Amino acid sequence: GINAEYMGIMGLGMYLNEEHKYTPQGKLLNDGTWEYKPPSALDIPLQLNITLLKDAPINPDGLLGSKGTGEPPMIVSCSAIFAVQDALRASLVQRGRKDPVNLNTPATVDVILNAATIALTDLKLM
């Protein structure tokens, strides 16, 4: 269970905030913890329940009967991108716009803000 939970969080980081930035010469700019932002304890839900299949048959081809537990939760993490994209689409519709929402990964805060296309006139106190 722990490996599956970790891979799910790793996938969230990959899709939402792990942007690699390079110089024109190809040198990685964000290679330290000041610039590189993997998920932290504050990014992880307080309750995260992963359930593995009960009485699943042993995999005769896997090492010691192992089954893949890393890739599936990482792939499922892409649902976060679809949730952000749906929220952006709802925001545009609420503001009377029909712009298409194309969200690339990693969907960092800057990418999401740019995709939201919020103008000062869109901001109103209720």
Image (cartoon, helix red, strand yellow):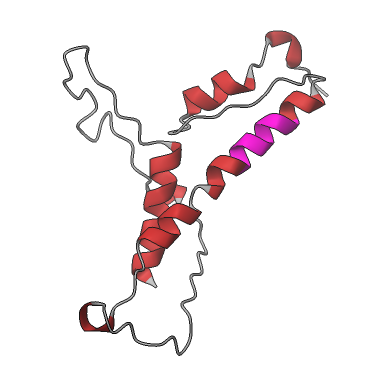
* Residue 46 appears left or right of 18: right
Look at 30% across and 29% down and name the residue there. Answer: 20
Whether residue 26 sits left or right of residue 87 in the image: it is: left
Q: Name the outermost residue toward the front.
A: 61
Give the residues in magenta. Answer: 83-90
Which of the 4 image quarters holds residue 22? top left
Question: Position of 97 compared to 27: left or right?
Answer: right
How many labels, in total?
Answer: 0
x%, y% of residue 3? Answer: 34, 66
Q: Position of residue 24 (x, y in %)?
A: 22, 12
> Measuring 37% from the left and 58% from the top, which residue is drawn there?
7
Q: Which of the 4 image quarters holds residue 27?
A: top left
User: In front: 57, or 4?
Assistant: 57
Residue, x 36% and y 68% (percent of image)? 69
Which quadrant: the C terminus?
Answer: top right
Q: Position of residue 21 (x, y in %)?
A: 28, 23
Q: Is residue 87 found inside the magenta-colored segment of the image?
A: yes
